[in-house]
Image (tube, grey):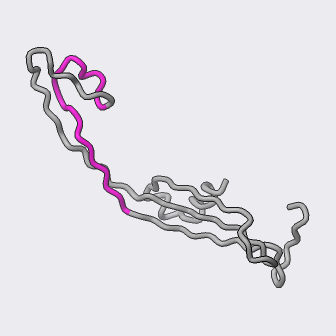
Amino acid sequence: MRGVDHDEENPDLRVNFYINTKDKIKTRSVPTAGGYYDYRDPFYDPWGGYGGMGVTYETQVDQYTEGTLNIDVVDSKTNKLVWEGSVVGRLTEKDVRNMVQTVDEAVA
C-alpha cells in the first residue's frame, strides 16, 4: 500500500474485525394448487375469482445461518476510523466449517 509501512511494533494502521452468526427462520405462505395463475407460484398470489377455484395455502419454513463480517481500519496515530466495511450473507454448513476460507472470500 502506498505510504504505509508494515511495522509490527509501531503500525500506521490497525485492522479490527468481528464475525457474528445467527440462526434464522423465515416463513411464508404460498398458494399450493389450482387457480388460473398457478404457473406464477410463488411470485404472485393466484386470484380465486374464476368460480372459486379452490386455492389453498401452505406455510414454507426456511432455516438458515446468517453471517456478518465487519472490518474496521483505524489510524494508529489519531485512533480514528479511516475505513469500514461489512458484508452479510447466508452461510452453508461448509462455510461455517471453513471459516478462514469463508472470510477470505467475503473480503475479496
Q: Classify 17 as above or below 54.
A: below
Residue depicted at 11% across the width and 20% down the height: 53
Residue depicted at 71% across the width and 69% down the height: 81
Q: Is residue 82 left or right of 23 when viewed as pictured?
A: right
Q: Classify 93 as above or below 7.
A: above
Occupied quadrant, residue 21: bottom left
Q: Is residue 106 left or right of 81 when viewed as pictured?
A: left
Q: Position of residue 1 (x, y in %)?
A: 85, 61
Task: Magenta stretch: give its range.
Answer: 23-42
Occupied quadrant, residue 73: bottom right
Residue depicted at 37% across the width and 55% down the height: 64
Q: Position of residue 6 (x, y in %)?
A: 85, 73
Q: Classify 53 as above or below 25.
A: above
Q: Position of residue 68 (x, y in %)?
A: 51, 61
The outermost residue toward the bottom is 9
Q: Is residue 54 magenta?
A: no
Name the residue nearer the viewer: 95 or 70.
70
Q: Classify 36 as above or below 26.
A: above
Q: Is residue 106 left or right of 94 when viewed as pictured?
A: right
Residue depicted at 79% across the width and 77% down the height: 78
Q: Is residue 108 left or right of 35 when viewed as pictured?
A: right
Q: How many marks?
A: 0
Name the residue nearer the viewer: 14 or 81.
81
Q: Is residue 32 magenta?
A: yes
The outermost residue toward the right is 3
Q: Position of residue 83 (x, y in %)?
A: 71, 62
